[in-house]
Image (cartoon, grey):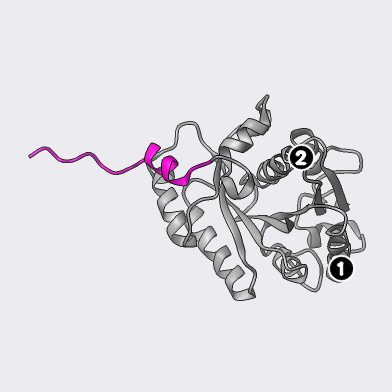
Amino acid sequence: MGIVAVSGTSTEVGKTVTTAAVAALARSRDRSVAVVKPAQTGLRPGEPGDLAEIERLAPGVVTYEYARYPDPLSPEAAARQAGDRPLRLTAVAKSIAALEDDYDLVLIEGAGGLLVRFGPDGWTLADLAWAVQAPVLLVAAAGLGTLNHTALTVEALDGRGVPLAGLVIGSWPTDPDLATRCNVVDLETVTGRPLDGVLPAGAPHEADFLAVAAAGLDASWGGTFDAMAFRASIDPAPAAVPQ
């Protein structure tokens, strides 16, 4: 299964839940899974972060966090603010590449969007993905603004020669408005491929997260999600005008 990087089009789009869903489905098929969070920001030592959430939702995964900074900033800015040593791309890439020998699947969860800086030399998750030859599973928001963010992120991946592993809407609302429903077709147009999944808002609080993951991700990730059926279920096409 190799290495897959998970990036959001921005922050708070459901990246951690999507990472947990991929991990949970792989574990359900008896695959060994490691999840790496190169840098966790906004938390102090001992406070539960993104990896704790993944461990809760996907029991059996092994997690690695390489750095933690207390301020809720980009990893580079948070390290600078803390007066701490920044992460180096070569060291992080070497460590992650070595994990591939021990696990069937290695997931790298980024911080915020694809081009958030991790070090003073400007390296990003895109650079890390290229260094370890990992495709990127992109997690997008559902509502207004997502088309521009997604298009820019896909363009950045293309320009760097990093493959797109798939596109997931990470937090689908219970009562989607017209823009949100229209975005489904438009997101597929932007990426040139059907959605790989749609995970519901509030998924981290579901009692049976494995069932949520299976329903929310397609067969390529071990689930049963059907993009065509989902599109039909939320079809925003206007009703025919009576003649």
Quadrant where the N terminus is found in the figure? bottom right
**Which structural element holds mark 1?**
loop
The structure residue drawn at horizontal position 61% and vertical position 68%, both measured from the top left corner, is: 157
Residue 54: numbered disc = 2
The amino acid type, in three-letter code, at marker 2 is: Ile
- Position of 235 relative to 90 (above/below): above
Mark 1 and mark 2 lie on one chain; the one further toward the N terminus is 2
Residue 144: numbered disc = none
The part of the image, by quadrant, that contains residue 30 is top right
Mark 1 and mark 2: Cα distance apart in space: 25 Å
Residue 88: numbered disc = 1
Mark 2 Cα shell of 10 Å, populated few (<14), some (14-19), many (≥20): many
In this picture, which residue range is highlighted in magenta?
Answer: 225-243
Q: Tell whether label 2 touches label 1 (CB within 8 Å).
A: no
The amino acid type, in three-letter code, at marker 1 is: Arg
Q: Position of residue 209 (x, y in %)?
A: 67, 31
